[in-house]
Image (spheres, helix red, strand yellow):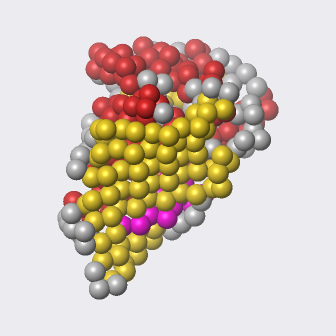
Amino acid sequence: MDNPVRWGILGAANFAREQMGPAIHAAKGAELFALATSDATKAAGFTAFAPGLRVHDTYDTLLADPDIDAVYIPLPNHLHVEWTLKALAAGKPVLTEKPITMQSGEFDQLIAARDNSGLLAAEAFMIVHHPQWIHARDLVADGAIGRLVRVDTTFSFDNRSETQNIRNRADTGGGSLRDIGVYTIGSARFVTGAEMSDVRASIDRENGVEVTCEMHARLGEVRFTGYTSMRAHPRQEANFHGEKGVIRMTTPFNANVFGMAQVVLERDGFEVMTRRYPGVNQYVIQVENFGASLRDGADYPCPLEFSRGTQDAIDAAMAAG
């Protein structure tokens, strides 16, 4: 595939307009080609930075467009499985926002559809594409902090006033674990390469929606603590604590939005080394890696099997709390 990958987006979500649409437009080897929305006002938010964008008034007509090479799905959580399957059935490789499923068992049909079609299907878990996470994983693997003993991750924001936000609605698959627990859990799994067991959780719910979760688990031989909340002051942090040092990540999830990404390594003797990543856009890298997989058959950094492991842990926390 020598020509740019022509992308179509299903739905004019705010996140797609603010982050993924511009990322597709900016990525090397990619073209933001089409959008599916019946709302002309929402379409205008995309054509402002991507003039000439082809606009379809239904999702089905976009999937039927023979000029589209790949599809990005930013729909509400409860629609992810349905439209991922429809995209694959239409012959389109597909990148679907997290969480790609509502329960771990739904991965069976996604993996089967992916394998039967021979097409790439993946969850848009963008942080594993950011070099700060690759660096953190390499530091742990290389023994920079000695034997890892504990991982703690935190991600919070406060959207209690947004009562109709899909994150605050049970019918659209809302909740802090589904929205941001993907990051607190998935990042720890990515760095350690281990799976979670002995999951315990303390959960607060409002109107049938989990809004805060403090989770404890075993991550292989390592202790794990994860905190997510949609009812607390914005904060995000990830720490990997070893016998010989600590790795601190102060903007682990929303690089360039919450702050500049950096990895701080603290070791015996008060040695501190900081690596910063100004201007690195993890969404752009995600699009480029997806395209590389389509063109060259390169391994994609976040296969469905990895995403399933994160959903396993989310399911366990929901059941425990």
On the question of residue 184 being in view, the answer is no
**Residue at image x 77%, y 41%?**
161
Query: Would residue 251 be counted in the magenta stretch?
Result: yes
Q: Which of 150/32 is in front?
A: 150
In the displayed structure image, the side of residue 285 where residue 75 appears, left or right: right
Q: Please indicate whether residue 275 sits to the left or right of residue 280 in the image.
A: left
Quadrant in which the N terminus is drawn: top left
How far across and down, in percent of the image, does residue 126 sit?
45, 46
Residue found at x 57% / y 42%:
212
> Does the magenta-highlighted stretch encompass residue 206?
no
Q: Position of residue 185 (x, y in %)?
A: 41, 44
Magenta span main SS: loop
Name the image quarter holding residue 73: top right
Please count the marks in the image: 0
Q: Which residues are magenta?
A: 247-257
Position of 247 relative to 73 (above/below): below
Residue 164, placed above or below residue 137: above
